[in-house]
Amino acid sequence: MESRVPVFLDHLRLTRGFSPHTVAAYRRDLEDFRGFLEKRHGVSPRVEDIADTDVRAFLADLTKRRLAERTVARRLATLRSFQQFLKKRGTTGVEVGPEVKGPRLPKDLPRTLSVEEIRSVLDDAAWETDRDLRDKAVLELLYSTGIRVSELVGLRHRDLQTKSGLLSVRGKGDKERRVPVGKTALSALKNYGETQSHSAPGDPLFVGRGQNPLSVRTVQRLVKQHLGRVARRSGLSPHLLRHTFATHLLDHGAELRAVQELLGHASLSSTQIYTRITMERLKQAHAQAHPRAENT
């Protein structure tokens, strides 16, 4: 396994364009599997010798260790991906048959912010310092476009076309898409840009100390800080703004296919989760307003 795993991880990073965070998660999953096999067999077996029974025993061990169901499901998904990678290269082993089932996970609805909460964050605060203006531009752009935090920190000045109001974004698998940017976000970006010295087209759009690109962690921290002023809950992250972006579009009549393209989802099923949020809101409104809705 030792020689095959690094090649697989390089494939995820270079060919499929996975983020360092995602690749690190795959590495942890496979290291845990290898550690289990070494205890089970006394040595680290060749991938060709890893059988279906080893995978089943690994899943049982994860359950015995009381790992979260989502963790168990992710480890199984990692093994399936590794198996498919090996098969495409003519190698057998790491047998994960279709009958091997992981835990059934509940489909939680993504949390979102209300329009009022968004307005409280973006309109009611005083944005005065250069850092404030940068943070506001980050928040406005995340909410206006629904881009991922990994996509935001990779933006360059050349990616923003202010005249047309379009942003070029490189998403998962290094696929590029163009998304519209609202006037309010463009205004925030203009105000932030006026605090910066001359920037070349290839320079990072958002910078921190030493004019270095903002890190994912810095964006996560600033989002949590500003959203925390109006929303007292867990999960205050850039992805919350992505969920909110998609839900608000659907709430106001956007077509599902259009939202899929804006989010950069490869599959429509990934976008359909937001229709459930919209339907839940309609049901709540009906239950509260209709005189005979008690049993609805």
Image: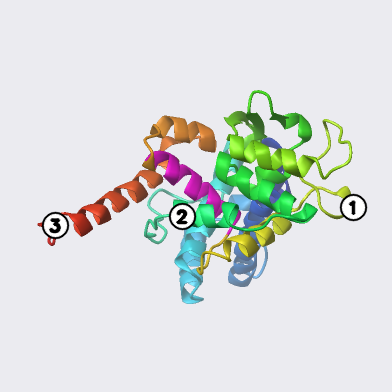
Q: Is residue 202 above or below residue 231?
A: above
- Give the mark, 3 or 1, whose residue is nearer the N terminus: 1
Span colored in magenta: 237-250
Element class at badge 2: helix
Check residue 240 for magenta coloring: yes
- Give the mark, 1 or 2, whose residue is nearer the N terminus: 2
Q: Residue at x 50, y 44 (%)?
A: 245
Q: Nearer the viewer, residue 38 or 108?
A: 108
Element class at badge 3: loop
Element class at badge 1: helix
Q: Which residue is mark 3?
A: 293
**Image disc number at residue 210:** 1
- Give the mark, 3 or 2, whose residue is nearer the N terminus: 2
Q: Which residue is mark 2?
A: 116
Q: Residue at x 67, y 50 (%)?
A: 136
Check residue 12 for magenta coloring: no
Q: Nearer the viewer, residue 92 or 131?
A: 131
Q: CA distance from mark 3 to mark 2?
A: 26 Å
Q: CA distance from mark 1 to mark 2?
A: 36 Å
Q: What amino acid is at disc 1?
A: Gly
Q: CA distance from mark 3 to mark 1?
A: 59 Å
Q: Residue at x 11, y 57 (%)?
A: 291
Q: Nearer the viewer, residue 109 or 35?
A: 109
Whether residues under marks 1 and 2 lie with C-beta atoms below 8 angstroms apart, the answer is no
**Image disc number at residue 259:** none
- In this rendering, does residue 73 appear at all? yes
Assess disc 2: are there few (<14), some (14-19) or many (≥20) residues with their C-alpha within 10 Å of its C-alpha.
Answer: few
Q: Residue at x 64, y 67 (%)?
A: 35
Q: Nearer the viewer, mark 1 or mark 2?
A: 2
Residue at the far left: name it.
292
Which x, y percent locates residue 19?
68, 47
Q: What amino acid is at disc 2?
A: Glu
